[in-house]
Each structure stands twice: as C-alpha cells, then as structure tokens.
Image: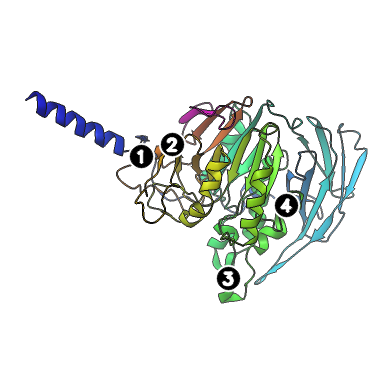
Amino acid sequence: MGVWVLLVGILLHGVALCNGGITSSFVRKTGMSVDMPLDSDVFRVPPGYNAPQQVHITQGDHEGRGVLVSWVTMDEPGSNTVLYGTSKDKLEFRAEGIVTSYKYYNYTSGFIHHCTLKKLEYDTTYYYEVGIGNTTRQFWFRTPPKVGPDVPYTFGLIGDLGQTFDSNSTLTHYESNPIKGQTVLYVGDLSYADNYPFHNNIRWDTWGRFVERSVAYQPWIWTAGNHELDFGPEFGERVPFKPFTHRYHVPYRASGSTSQLWYSVKRASAYIIVLSSYSAYGKYTPQYQWLEQELPKVNRSETPWLIVLVHSPWYNSYNYHYMEGETMRVMYESWFVQYKVDLVFAGHVHAYERSERVSNIAYNIVNGKCSPVDDTSAPVYITVGDGGNIEGLANNMTEPQPAYSAFREASFGHAVLDIKNRTHAYYAWHRNQDGFSAVADSVWFFNRYWQPDN
C-alpha cells in the first residue's frame, strides 16, 4: 500500500511539473465590445477654424533629448512651427517641421505635421504650442532623466486599444493608476480602422482625438501591428502601412534603421528595441541585418534594462493566434538569450499572459529537444493585447496550461513597469474591472545582466 501511495505521489508530482502556473479564476462580464458613438466627447473636434487636433508626441532621437511632435489640421496646412519653452508664459524657442498627407481609397487625410524638438534638457518640463492665430493649443511634457544605469523610470504598457467603451476604460485606468507611467510602450494595433468597410480612415482621425488626452503629454513608443497593415488590393490599396507611416513618425534613422517599423531608443535606464512582426524578418532582410548589428551595441553598464516590443507573441497559450509568432521566434530567440534580453512585450492576443523565463533554442531537427525549458538567460514574455478593441476578448485557452505560462487571464487592462535601479523592477498588471489601485498580477523582475539568478 505504501509503495502505491508513493507511486501515485510521484505521478501527481510529474503532472504538476507538466502543467503551467495560474489560470485566473476571475469571472468577467461576457459580451462583445461596443464602439463609442462618433459624437462622444472623447472624439470631440477642438473648437476654432483649422484648430490642431490629434496631437501626439514620441521620442525624437536615440538618447531622450528629442521629442517628435505630430498633429493634424483639417482645413488647410496652417503653420508647421512649434513654439516651446520651460515656462507656459514664455515659449522662447521655435522649431520648424514638415507637412504630409495621403489618399486612401475614397478618403483624403488632413494635413499631418511632424516637428522634432532637439537638444532638450533632461528631466525638465517643457510647454509647447501648435496652431496659428486664434486657434493655437498648448500642451506640456517632461523629458526623461539622463541615461544611466540606476535611473528609476516608469513605463505604461498598452496594446490593441481600439475605440470602444472598453478602450476608454483602459485609458482611464492607466491615467488614474497611482503608479504613474511616464511613457507608454505601445505594442501595436491602434485604431482598428480596417475593421470597417474600405478601411474607413475617418477612424484613424477619431482614434487620434481619443488618445490625445494622454499622448499629447507623454511619449508613446509605437509598434506596428497587423491592423496597421491596411493592405487592400481588392480596392486598389497596395502599399502596406500607408496611414500608419504617414501619421506616426518615429526616430528610426537615429538607430541606423532603414524603416519606421523597426528601431530603438534609450530612455533613462532602458534600451528599447521595436520590431515588426509583419515585415520581412528572415535572414538577409533589412530587419534581420539591422537587429544583428543592433544587439551588440547595447551597453548594459549604461542601459541595463533591455526591452523588446513586438506585436505577435512568441509564447502564447490561447487558441487565438496560436503559434503565429513562431517563425520569428525561431529566427531571433537565440539572440535574445545570448544578449540576455530582460522582457519581451507583445499584443495581438486580446487577453493577458505572463511567461516563465524559458527558451526553446536547443532543437536542431534531429535531437528531439523541442520543448521550452527553464532558462535564466531568457526573457519573460508578456502579452498585453488587452486594450479593449472591437474584436472582444480572447477567452479560449489551450488546455492544459503549458509549463512556460506563469499567469493568464482573459480580461481587458494595462500594465506598468516601474524600474527601480540596475537590478530590480516592479511590474504590475491591472484589469479594468478593479479599482485604480488594485493589482491583478505582479512580480519583481531581476535584471538579466546585473542580477542573472532569480
């Protein structure tokens, strides 16, 4: 009898090891997400003739001393000038930008302005003004601290936002979080304009006005997702990413990239690499060659936290988009382990998931080693495609939960990454159904370079 009990115990222990971590038992309200009406306050056009709208900022250089300001004027080009300064009553500096526009099927965009403010002081609040005559608008932002290994900094994580009532809840929760994000790492899928007939580009305008309340005041670091492709050859639109690349400029040339869709920036103690899941990434492609040259450049004594943003997750235990990121993982995962990437954030799957530190790089076709294993040099993979878009939640999970999955839940929300110093960072995920201070999943991360053991 004792032997049988021992055997049963061993078998049950083996089952526990094969299964993953926690699948949340939280029960959320089911049902489809619903778009906010076009006459909602969040989409309101600012008053005045040709008033600047859809104002947004992102990092404008590689080091964090530049800010790229973008906005749209609908009636005529207006002014390309940005006035700015450290006092709201004395905007003593000026910068000149460019203007562009595009046509998409039966839609013609407004006049899209981009202007880079350069050589700003670190850790300083700036006020800036766009527009002309009686329809100027003023905003502000704060530059990051000077790049350094022990500089604390807090990032927000949002993905797959869209423009539904759930989207508004996600953005409100992020804005109201007592852990205040200073910059958003956005992991792709913005407006979901392509979910409407002929990719109705008016939805790009409404989305820009919706998120202005945040992105006009703090940078959002942009990643392109599948809903940014806007590839519609059936109605004559054969140029991928046309609306996105016209509207959302990034400082890609500063990191030696040849495309807006992959690039890198330094911010405080973090080095952030943005990749494109929907551009060519095989060997000899521009993205592959850029990343191969980029990773060795990262100085972990200067920027200890190495973070990668992609859209399609490499480790995903939902039935939605299952293994869609697999070929990119096969191409690049060994590099991520070699260079000890700390965190990889993705969207695409409309739910939340956090992995263990695992890798699946031993497989060489004939050795049969084709399952992920614990690897302290590997990143944690986190899916935050839970912004609230019109397609609804991904609530169908693979069973049993795989060993690489530490926590998963099908709810809308956002996350924050609060970097403390070169060795420690606090991470928390917040679901929309909770109070602003409530945490649904949290963990302390140890830096892979400076604190390699968990």
The residue that mark 2 highlights is 356
User: Pointer 2: residues within 10 angstroms few (<14), some, or many (20+)?
Assistant: many
In the depicted structure, whether residue 28 falls above or below residue 194: above
**Residue 213 lies in what quarter of the image?**
top right
* Mark positioned earlier in the residue sequence (2 or 1): 2
Of mark 1 and mark 3, the one earlier in the sequence is: 3
Give residue 403's mark: 1
* Mark 2: amino acid: Glu
Please, which colouring scheme is shown?
rainbow
Residues shaded magenta: 434-454
Mark 3 — residue?
Answer: 232
Q: Which residue is mark 4?
A: 252
Question: Tag 1's secondary structure?
Answer: loop
Badge 1: residue crowd in 10 Å (few <14, some 14–19, many ≥20): many
Residue 194 magenta-drawn? no
Residue 205 vertical placement versus 157 (above, below):
below
- Can you give x and y, in whole percent of width and height, for residue 355 in the image? 44, 39
Quarter-of-image position of residue 427: top right
At a point 55% along the width and 42% down the height, the residue shown is 338
Q: Position of residue 55 (x, y in %)?
A: 74, 48
Residue 56 at x, y = what percent?
A: 72, 46
* Dot 2 or dot 3, earlier in sequence: 3
Q: Is residue 392 above or below residue 121?
A: below
Query: Which residue is at the front of the view, 194 or 405?
Result: 405
